[in-house]
Image (tube, rainbow, N blue to C red):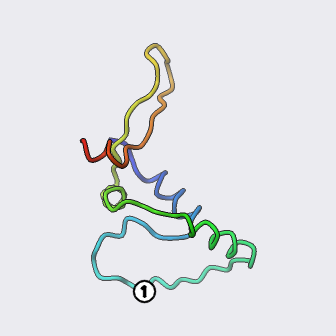
Amino acid sequence: LIDAHPFKSWYESHYGVKIGQGKGPAEADSEETKQSEHVKRKLAARQKGRTLEEVIDSQMASGRLLAKITSRPGQSGRCDGQILEGAELAFY
């Protein structure tokens, strides 16, 4: 288990959408931030190929993500890994 906050904040800034809100009542957070036309076009282009599994969205809401460590033994001070998704996540 790892902390989901850094991943959640990157996803929200990269795609311009809020994630991990849960299925509660949808509150209208219509805080319009000033964005240039270039930024709006860039975010719209990123939305075309964006998909997020429900399981990962619920993990983001809880604040924890399942991940696996891919570092080799003997490395000190660094830990590389991958977030589990798809068939791997269904296995666990």
Residue nearer the viewer, 87 or 73: 87
Asked where in the image residue 55 lies, by quadrant, the reply is bottom left
- Which residue is at a point 50% across and 85% down the rendered structure image? 30
Q: Residues within 10 Å of mark 1 (few under 14, many from 20)?
A: few
**Residue at x-position 51% and y-position 64%:** 50
Tell me where residue 32 appears, x and y as whole percent: 58, 83
Residue visible at 51% across and 70% down? Answer: 17
Helix, strand, or loop for circle 1?
loop
Q: Is residue 44 above or below residue 58?
A: below
Front-most of residues 70 and 79: 70
9 sits left or right of 35 in the view:
left
Quadrant in the picture for residue 68: top left
Query: Which of 46/67 is in front?
Result: 46
How many labels sit on residues? 1
Q: Quadrant of the N terminus?
A: top left
Q: Is residue 23 left or right of residue 7?
A: left
- Residue 15: where, in percent of width, then height? 56, 65
Image height of 89 relative to 57, above or below? above
Query: Circle 1 sits on which residue?
Result: 28
Q: Amino acid at mark 1?
A: Ala
Question: Vertical placement of 3 versus 30: above or below?
Answer: above
User: Which residue is at 70% across, 72% downward?
Assistant: 39
Viewed as shown, does residue 88 lie left or right of 74? left
Q: Residue furthest left?
A: 92
**Quadrant placement of the C terminus:** top left
User: Which quarter of the picture shows residue 37?
Assistant: bottom right
